[in-house]
Amino acid sequence: MELKLHSFNKKSTAKLKVPDSIFDAPYNEALIHQVVTSYLSASRAGTKAQKTRSEARGGGRKPWRQKGLGRARAGTIRSPIWRSGGITFAAKPRDYSKKVNKKMYRGAIRSILAELSRQERLLFIDDVKMESPKTKALVEKLDSMKLKEVLIITDEINENLYLASRNIPCVDVVDTQEINPYTLIGYEKVLMTKPALEKVEAWLA
């Protein structure tokens, strides 16, 4: 199939041939949901930790004798029902990640890219080169393409482009190695350079 190839430095378009296996793939909502959920779960730190009654400092001595005082039996001042005691079901560090094999992950990326293309949210550009790290210059380029909330995907991060984009709200720049399903669906538009497209095709082929 053929899609439009925009130019970054001048207002012109050309035809770009892309593989149907990637950009005409069927939309698999269940697979995308599973992969996005897995990605978000793997992003969780899982470092929350609390102390049980045995881990709380102190409480080694029985606070009073077992019988004869008319008080409830107590073996430690670190009981969970006591103030400053341990936690009954204490949270411990854990791994929230869910396994997703490579074939499923690549299938979800193909499905997302195809759906973005069908919704006209995926645009291709010859290259994104900035002569200087000027935010104003990048804003003017994006305004000329009527882009406000956009994810720019390049084959490798250009320092001038990164510096120019980091102060613009809702604009992010990533390279092909940082592509993930959550980021792809999180922006109104996705702008991919031609060199980045070649890398994506090799990855998803």
Image (cartoon, rainbow, N blue to C red):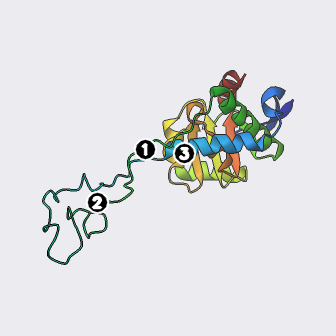
Position of 182 with respect to 45 (left or right) is right
Q: Marks 2 and 3: CB-CB under 8 Å?
A: no
Frontmost of labels 2 and 3 is 2
Position of 60 with respect to 172 (left or right) is left
Residue at the spot x=54%, y=38% of the render? 131
Give the x, y percent position of residue 49: 35, 52
Frontmost of labels 2 and 1 is 2
Q: Specify the amino acid type for callout 1.
A: Arg
Q: Spatial distance from mark 1 to mark 3, Cα to Cα?
A: 11 Å
Identify the mark nearer the N-term, 2 or 1: 2
- In the displayed structure, 189 sits above or below 112; it is below
Viewer-closest of 148 and 177:
177
Q: Residue furthest bottom?
A: 70
Say what secondary structure mark 2 lies in.
loop
Location of residue 202 (image quadrant): top right
Viewer-closest of 164 and 43:
43
Q: Spatial distance from mark 2 to mark 3, Cα to Cα?
A: 28 Å
Identify the mark nearer the N-term, 1 or 3: 3
**Residue with the mark numbered 3:** 41
User: In this orientation, does residue 19 appear?
Assistant: no
**Residue with the mark numbered 2:** 86
Residue at the spot x=76%, y=37% of the render? 111
Q: Marks 2 and 1: CB-CB under 8 Å?
A: no
**Residue with the mark numbered 1:** 94
Few, some or many C-alpha atoms within 10 Å of disc 3 (few <14, some 14-19, many ≥20)? some
Identify the mark nearer the N-term, 2 or 3: 3
Residue at the spot x=39%, y=53% of the render? 91
